[in-house]
Amino acid sequence: MTLTVRWPALLIGVLVAAPAAAGETASFITGTYAMEGRCAAWAAIEAGGPRNVETVPETLTADGFSSWEGGCSFVSVKEVEESRRWVATMECGEEVEEWTEEDTFNLDPASGRISVTVEGKTSVYERCDVAKGN
């Protein structure tokens, strides 16, 4: 048996750090979010700045998470508290690794921030593109 590796396709799959197409989007997420304090890095990338492991922040959109090394896409989203809390099944990948996880999203209506809990760890995301009218 011969194993054929298609290097260009494999390399493209590793270098493109965007969520894979999955089941649905999260309609409660409007615009682009980054972890607290990382919106300036996102703005620099949007303005054409250099893209590398140190400059590309993890972002969250209605499609899922995206970072330099990988991403997660929404498979299913269930609202568990009206307009405040959702539980989502996510398909994730980083380089050649793939996994499924369940994430909890809490929207703070006052600040507009979204807290995301994965395996007991919570990260806070703030909206980066508010000034763009998105």
Image (cartoon, grey):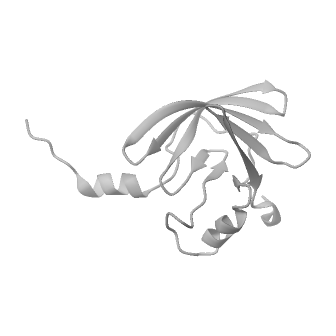
Identify the residue at horizontal 32%, vertical 56% (top origin). Answer: 11
Instruction: Reply above or below: 30 against 121.
Output: below
Q: Is residue 55 left or right of residue 126?
A: left
| Residue that sits furthest to the left in the current view | 1
x then y, percent, for residue 98? 42, 37
Q: Residue at x 40, y 40 (%)?
A: 97
Q: Position of residue 130 (x, y in %)?
A: 81, 60
Question: Could you tell me which residue is drawn at 69 percent across and 61 percent down?
Answer: 38
Instruction: Point out the image quarter for the C terminus.
Output: bottom right
Residue 71 place in picture, x, y as percent: 52, 47
Most distant residue in the right direction: 110
Vertical placement of residue 134 versus 101, above or below: below
Q: In the picture, which quadrant includes the N terminus?
A: top left
The quadrant in which residue 116 appears is top right
The residue lying at 66 percent from left, 49 percent from top is: 61
Occupied quadrant, residue 81: top right
Instruction: Indicate left or right for 118 with 130 as reference.
Output: left
The answer to which of 120 and 124 lies nearer the viewer is 120
Image position of 69 with respect to 106: above or below: below
